[in-house]
Structures are given as C-alpha cells and as structure tokens.
Amino acid sequence: MSFDSLGLSEKVLTAVAAAGYREPTPIQSGAIPHVLERRDVLGIAQTGTGKTASFVLPMLTLLERGRARARMPRTLILEPTRELAAQVEENFSRYGVNHKLTVALLIGGVSFDEQDRKLGRGADVLIATPGRLLDHQERGKLLMQGVEILVIDEADRMLDMGFIPDIERICKLIPFTRQTLFFSATMPPEIQRLADKFLQNPIKVEVARPASTAETVTQKLIGSGGEQHEKRAVLRQLVRSAVNLKNAIIFCNRKRDVATVFHSLERHGFSVGALHGDMDQHARTATLDSFRKGNLTLLVASDVAARGLDIPDVSHVFNFDVPHHAEDYVHRIGRTGRAGRSGEAVTIVSSSDQKSLAAIEKLIGNAIPWSEPLPETGEEEGEPRRRSGGDRRRKGERPEGRSDRAEGQGNRRRDRGESRRHAEPVEAIVDAEEAPPPPRAPRAPRPERERPKAEPVSQAAPERNRRRRDPEDRDPPVIGLGDHVPAFLLRPVRLRKTKIDDLAETLDEEAEAS
C-alpha cells in the first residue's frame, strides 16, 4: 500500500515524498482514511510507529478548505508535555510546506505576548498543553467555538496523570459536533472508559496488542544493591561496557535523582545532559537539540522524555529506576529501536523493585531475561555516599549533590586552597585513604601575652559582691514594714453613716422611749 491510496491531497503527497517516505505504517494506513471521513478515531499502536503523522497528514488535507478567524482556531491538538507539542509543530512545518497555514504553539515557559500575536492573526492549527491553553482562555484571548477537530495525543497520559479536569473543561468549550481523535501506545481498561466520554461512535484502529514492545528492542535486566551509590556504579559499568553505543537515554523516576545521576556522570568524565520538568524551557530545548545533534552522548531524563519524543537514532536506553507505572516502561524503551532500527534497553533492578517488575512483565506478556552480573571493579568506593546528619564524613569527601558555592565555603573553613569542582580519580582517592597521614611540623611556641590586671572591686556595691562570694552570709528577710509605721496608717478610721445606720439609731431610740 502507498500513500496515494489513502485519499490524501496532492500537496500532502508531494511533501511526504520530499520527506523520503514511500509506504505508510500500519497505524497510518488504518487511521488516515477514517480521519478523512470525519469519524472519531481511537488509535492504539506501539511507540515509534508514526502515530503523529496519522493525524497530521489528514488534518492538512482537511484544512485546505476554509480560513481561520482571529482568536478562533480551526483545530486543536493537546499534548501532555512541551517537548511533544514542539515536536508536533515541527511535523506540521515539514508536511505542510506546500500549505499556507498558520500554526500557533501554546506552551509554558515562554512569553504570552508572542503567543497572543499569533492568536490575533488567526490560527488554523493550535497546539497546546492544557494549562497554558486555559490561561489564554481565561484572559479572554482565545475563543474555541470554531474548533472542528480535537486531537488528544498520548491519551492515557493525558487522562491518567491529572489532566482529567482540564480535558473535561476544554471539551465543554468546544462544539459538540467536533471530530475527536485519540492516539496512544497504551490503553488500559479504566482509561478506555474515560475515553468513551469524549468519543462519539469511534473507529478503533489497533495495529498491535496494547502495551506491546517492539521486536527490534533487546531487553535485559541487571541486579544491583538498593543503595543509590551502588546503582550509579552499575550504571557507569553498563555505559562503559555497552556494545555499539552511539547515544543513550537514562531514565529516573524522580527529578532529584536526575540531577544526582547527571552530576555523578559528569564528574566521571561522561558527555551528559539533564532533562526534567523543573528546568527552564530554553534549557530543555537546548539540551534536546544538543542530544539530537550528537553533541551529548548521554541524556539523563525523567518521564518527560518518555512520551513521543522523536529522536530516531537512539541506540540504548538505561532504566536507572524501574518505573512505578508499567505503561511507562513501554514508552521508555520505545525511545530506541524506532523506524525498524535495532536498540537495547537495560533496566537496573534492586530487591525493592520486584513488585513493579512483575507488573511490567504481566503488561507486556513476556518475561524479561536477566543479564550476567558485571565484574566487580571497586569503583563504587570512590563514589561519595550519603550519610545521615549525625555521621561525620571523611576528610576530603564530597557529599552528593552539594553545590559549588557551599563546597567553596567548606573549603575556606578548612583552610584548603585547592578546588573541588572536578572529582579526583578513584585510584587517587583510594590511595589517599590507605596512605598514612604525613608527619606534621612542630609548631613554634606562642609568645605569652601580658595578662591584664584585675580591676578593683567597685565600692558602690560591696555588700552585693560579698553576698556573691558567700551565699550563706546574708541578712534575714524583712517582714512587714519594719520599725517605722507610716503616719496615715495610725489615723483613726471614720465610718460614714448610711441610711441603715440612721434607721438603726431611730429604732434604738424608740425602744428606749417605750
């Protein structure tokens, strides 16, 4: 089957041929005809099989008729991350080279003003993350009554990771007669029920079993201790011993672990970059561009890089942490082995990861083979270990994740002049720990200072000083007012007569008279 038989326009076919594609993938051949018929589509396929082109190509054909009005986009594409949104924009630029369509990208981390100007000119295609889209809508800069096609990419992530309220709110702002397209690599039953709320009589295009992995990816497991420094040592051995490693993505579960692994690999001389959700958007874009161009060999990332990023020539994927959600494993290893290429995915497993590993093997329907243990190199001894607050660190040991500023202050406190921005080789650290300390030169005796003479005790408070020296020699406590009584206490008290007193006197007089 060729693209000519799918019903695409001549402009789109010319752009596809210029991009070097001759035959559509199974998800493209199954979804594109139904999208052109204005049907709701639920597409499920393995990652890396061309799901993005499955809705970009037919949308370009449908948008050739009509014109966008100011602040009223004709189509809306929702993405869970900024990187995916920017990647979809690149696909529209590539395949829409023969079209005069306006594409607006609404993502966080960039200025509102430029996005407002694009919306003011009118956008045929609006690509956005839910949060930034609702920000523009609340400011009155965006009207969505003219949306004809709604695309929710990575539907399981959009619905499963806290986007449900935003998606429901956005769907209420869009006309009911819209066309809705869902695309994802995994679709668990509970997510399927949520998707049914937004789709009207959909066509389900499933070209592979849900949550299946590509056959071109070789999967392995390797054991490690539960400590972080042991896992980092295993990771370094895996990278050094990998066969035909061109570049690799290293996935961590937490953002703080991304920073820790990045600094560890950087100190050991690897060409490495970091990518996680707390980074500035410009830094994230620059890191991805450097990795795509080959300026970086390793990329330590959170699951923000696990969904849909099109980096076609990744040779290896290393899971530093076993993902908590089994579906994330499918997306992570899908970064390698794309477009028919071969790839390798290695997961570091500790004793606490057995439950998560069992869920992954149940989801993909296969048991992942274990790799042979790596030879002991003793390298982990040179890796700084985290200690509790009460433990003392060895002299010269650098705590993991310590900033350069704090480290410099610690060096000045220890009166040490050398810089510790780069870690010393492991052999040098081990030799320094095993070698006896050098003998110290005897210190010269300090000159005796003339002690200041004691000042004489003030005569103003001799009694106080005497009591301080002898606490038992004190005067008896004073009780009452002493020998002298104030004169006002010796005056007689004159009681004031009241009506009761007058009445009593009158009764007494009458009694005496009778």
Image: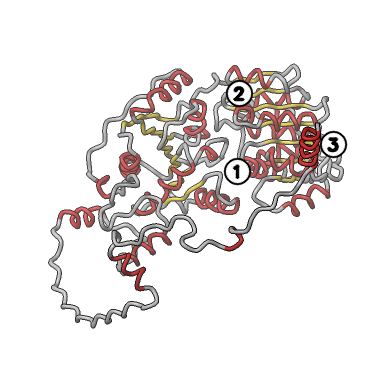
Classed neighbour count for the residue bearing mark 1: other residues with Cα under 10 Å, few (<14), some (14–19), many (≥20) = many
x 68%, y 31%: residue: 152
Whether 341 is drawn above or below 494: the answer is above
Can residue 170 be seen by looking at this rendering? Answer: yes
Give the camera-side residue of 101 and 482.
482
**N-terminal of the two: label 3 or label 2?**
2
Q: Which residue carries the number 2 mark?
A: 44
Kindly identify which numbered label has been placed on residue 65: 3
Label 1: element kind = helix
Q: Position of residue 462 (x, y in %)?
A: 35, 73
| Closer to the eye: label 3 or 2 | 2
The quarter of the picture where residue 92 lies is: top right
Please name the amino acid that badge 3 sits on: Arg
Give the camera-side residue of 363 and 226.
226
**What is the distance, in whole Å, between disc 2 and disc 1 at their CAs?**
21 Å
Q: Position of residue 68 (x, y in %)?
A: 84, 42
Q: Position of residue 201 (x, y in %)?
A: 74, 16
